[in-house]
Amino acid sequence: MEFKSVKEIVDFCQELFDDIGFARAREWKAAQPGRKVIGYMPVYVPREIIHAAGMLPLGILGGGADMEVIHGDAYYQSYICRIPRSTIEMAVTGKLDFVDGMVFPSICDVIRNLSGIWMLLFKDRYVRYFDAPQNFKDDIGGVFYSNELREFREGLEKLAGREITDENLRNSIAVFNENRRWVNKVYDFRAAFPWKAPSAEVYLLMRAGMVLPVEEHTRLMQAYLSAAEAGKRRMRDNCRVVLTGVFCEQPPLNLIRSLEISGCYIVDDDFMLVNRWLLGDVPADGDPIGNLSRAFLHHSAQTAAKYEPDMAEKGRYLLDAIRARSADGVIFAAPSFCDPALLDQPMMISRLEALKIPYITMQYAENSGQMQPIREQSGTFADSIKLWSAS
Amino acid sequence: MTVSIGIDVGSGVVKTALFRVEGGKPEWLARWDARIRQRDSFTLVDESIAFVLEEAGLSRDDVDYIATTGEGESYQGATGHFYSMTTHARGALYLNPEARAVLDVGALHGRAIRIDGKGKVLNYRMTGQCASGSGQFLENISRYLGIAQDEIGALSKKSTNPEKVSSICAVLAETDVINMVSRSIPPSDILRGIHESMAERLIKLLKSIDVREGLVMMTGGLALDAGLVKAMQDGMEKQEMVAQVASHPDSLFAGAIGAALWGAFRHGKLQVLGNFPKAS
């Protein structure tokens, strides 16, 4: 598929975003007999292994702003976030009936319980709770995590009915390295020219990567960058902010748009962290499982979703992002009832306050509809930065 | 020298002000305002810019910063946008340097803002979404009573026996007014009753942000309603507040003035930082 303009690319991505029936992934599966699709919940799963099995990794990021949750509410209490409820709703209403397996990364109790519910509801499907180490020493957490990766590989081999060779894995690692490089290029471009790559567009572009084959997503990002670089868009006098705390349940697209309209250029974020969880290339030679394990232990993003044993290091990743992106302030946007994000927030805030970095906090659900208070809050935050800070 | 344009896109009226700032001294060169009346507000913004430029004898290239406020966030021709509390704070201070609080009452909202001597917002509070206590409500009532809007203030001040109106909800208040008309209550007493009801809500807003003394500057369209200003002053005295209420003939333009002045300030700051082009 050839794209010529930013609009064409963004329209295509919007179509994928709006389609919670995953027509594109269904087409991919139907195009060749025996193809399989593996869904995964947000944050991080080693998609390289799914790809190496010849399967399509499919990001399941909840039901979005417009889906009505009816059945999902029966499975969970009211005082938890919305994403597990809307995900169950999608499953029991047949929107995920083509998905051959689901992977639930270790992020919180709610998602862990969701993996259990899935096992009970869909006994004929592959279901994996993908555990992550809380210890980052090679001889302890590394051994545990390598075993976890091997078990995941064996499970998919069984499902695929074929072996996943080391060579398959090395090839997939290289393909995802390439994809990650382009993701980072898009993020770097947006940080340098935020008016040329509005965050809502970048978000849609990254969301497309959740449902498209990785090679196609890489080409899409290449096309977007080349069109956006050539585009003439007007720079506005906005402040520059890092948005953090999102990582799992995604905010409504309108919230992202509202932040930018209100005067905040988002120059870094933690949307769809799976794209940028690993910070650099994973070596594409040698032992692929060992390489993936070491990348996770030593070269992965520090967020609320990853335990940081050294308190002196806590917050370093956010502070580095603020410095690297020349951000004026931080917006903490966390899903309502998200324990990991909201427990992490005070620790992050204490780091910012020590350095007198301005910040605001807000909460949302994937179906939040009222944007006026959000705009007012972020808009006055932008005003205060523009008028009363050194920026 | 900096030339800036401030545009306040309100719910009912678009207001535009063009300023030249030299050596920190602002000079108001041109102004424009028009009721939106179901027209496209951004088309009106374009018209207003053309008008004030012509009035000031300037071209678009002479303008350093175009700042929007109010509902002008999405106007593509702006250099930047400032929020209403920020711009009304600065506009009020321009109109009266003694102001330490602002009461912005427009077509749909009432907003109380506490400020310092530099125009920095210290606290603010808005009325809810209900239209009671706003210009739109008063406009509807004047239509029912068959009274021109510019007659409202003078009539209200003539009242001798104000009739109490619901301050909770515009629908209830409108029902109250219909009943009053059928009971032959004079329009002056009805209007004064409405002004007192609005003042009661607005004083609550001021108190909620700890405004009890100093000068409260009224801005927005209803700042020109002498009946409301009087009801505010009487209401505050009744509640033994030391604060004084003031208005200004240009209070309608407070948001646009503030946007233009902050735009000029911002332009100067960005020039020092060396990272921003002129408005185009």
Image (tube, grey):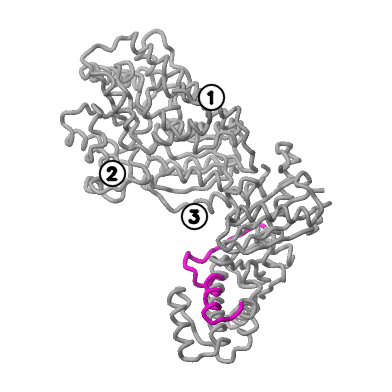
Cβ–Cβ under 8 Å for marks 1 and 2? no
Please state the extent of the stretch shown in magenta in the rendering: B120-148
Determine the secondary structure under disc 3.
Answer: helix
Relative vertical location of residue B219 with respect to residue A299 in this rendering, above or below: below
Specify whether B115 is left or right of A82.
Answer: right
Badge 1 or badge 2: first in the primary sequence: 2
| Image position, residue A152 (x, y; %) | 27, 21
Determine the secondary structure under disc 2.
Answer: helix
Quadrant location, the N terminus of chain A? top left
- Residue tagged 2: A85
Specify whether A354 is left or right of B255.
Answer: left
To the question of a shared chain for discs 1 and 2, the answer is: yes
| Image position, residue A246 (x, y; %) | 43, 39
Specify the subunit that label 3 lies on. Answer: A
Q: Which mark is residue A373?
A: 3
Determine the secondary structure under disc 1.
Answer: helix
Amino acid residing under circle 2: Arg
Badge 2 or badge 3: first in the primary sequence: 2
Q: Is residue B29 magenta?
A: no
- Density class for disc 3 (Cα within 10 Å; few <14, some 14-19, many ≥20) is few
Nearest to the observer: residue A263 or residue A288: A263
Q: Is residue B139 magenta?
A: yes
Specify the subunit that label 1 lies on. Answer: A
Relative vertical location of residue A187 with respect to residue B114 in this rendering, above or below: above
Amino acid residing under circle 1: Lys
Residue B19 can be seen in this image: yes
Residue beneath the point at 65% across and 47% down: B78
